[in-house]
Image (spheres, rainbow, N blue to C red):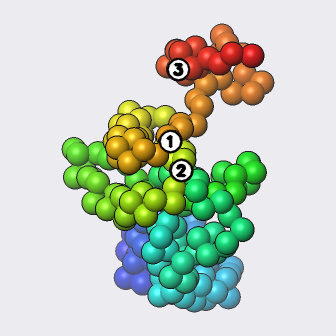
Amino acid sequence: MTNLGPSIEQLMAALRCLPGVGPKSAQRMTFHLLEHNRDGGERLAQALSHALNNVHHCQRCRILSETELCSRCSDSQRQQDQLCIVESPSDVLAIEQATHYKGLYFVLSGHLSPLDGIGPEALGIPTLIKLFDQGHIQETILATNPTVEGEATAHYISQLAHSRKIHVTRLAHGIPLGGELEYVDSGTLSHAFSGRESI
């Protein structure tokens, strides 16, 4: 590779930390910022620096927040007895945009994966146990992803909740609205069939 100078190569390498950004994408972004949009680059640098210095995790639900308690946790209008457990902050936004759910959240920031060294501590399970032990939560909604790790994480949390007499529900997984059976993968179809409901 042609030596472009340490500053350019350092910027390209830094951009590659973003998900889905490979060498070519990082190169295009770098050249675009330096050749066509230096003002945008300055704004990006300032916004990134500001966010890194000011955004932390909510002490209660672990979503990204600039305050000790995020706006949802500090909102007394939300249902305090429902707790939806998700794997990432983006899952919270997806649920908020697609549903009328008005309870609280808990963000794991991942899932159990012993092979990768991700255990209960890394997912904030001690904080979750404290929430359970306060006695306010009546229903825990498990909204982890329908993967092997997501299912194992959901099972682990359901055991913690059941032992404290907390009602546990799991998001339904199955055939998407408008989907056709012949195009649905066998795992999804099996899950949908075993989870069928009365009508």
Horizontal side of residue 196 vs 6, given as left or right? right
- Residues at marks 2 and 3, CA–CA distance in whole angstroms: 26 Å
Image location of residue 26, percent across then percent down: 51, 65
Which label's residue is closer to the chain start, 1 or 2? Answer: 2
Which label's residue is closer to the chain start, 2 or 3? Answer: 2
The amino acid type found where label 1 is placed reads: His
Q: Secondary structure at mark 2?
A: loop
What is the quadrant of the C terminus in the image? top right
Kindly identify which numbered label has been placed on residue 191: 3
Residue located beneath label 2 in the image: 138
The quadrant in which residue 150 appears is top left
Q: Residue at x 73, y 54 (%)?
A: 97
Kindly identify which numbered label has been placed on residue 167: 1
Residue lying at the far top of the rendered structure: 182
In front: 31, or 60? 60
Q: Residue at x 65, y 18 (%)?
A: 197
Kindly identify which numbered label has been placed on residue 58: none
Image location of residue 14, percent across then percent down: 42, 73
Horizontal side of residue 152 vs 100, given as left or right? left
In front: 186, or 40? 186
Rendered view: 163 above or below 78: above
The amino acid type found where label 2 is placed reads: Gln
The amino acid type found where label 3 is placed reads: His
Rendered view: 111 above or below 104: above
Q: Residue at x 47, y 70 (%)?
A: 60
What is the quadrant of the N terminus in the image? bottom left
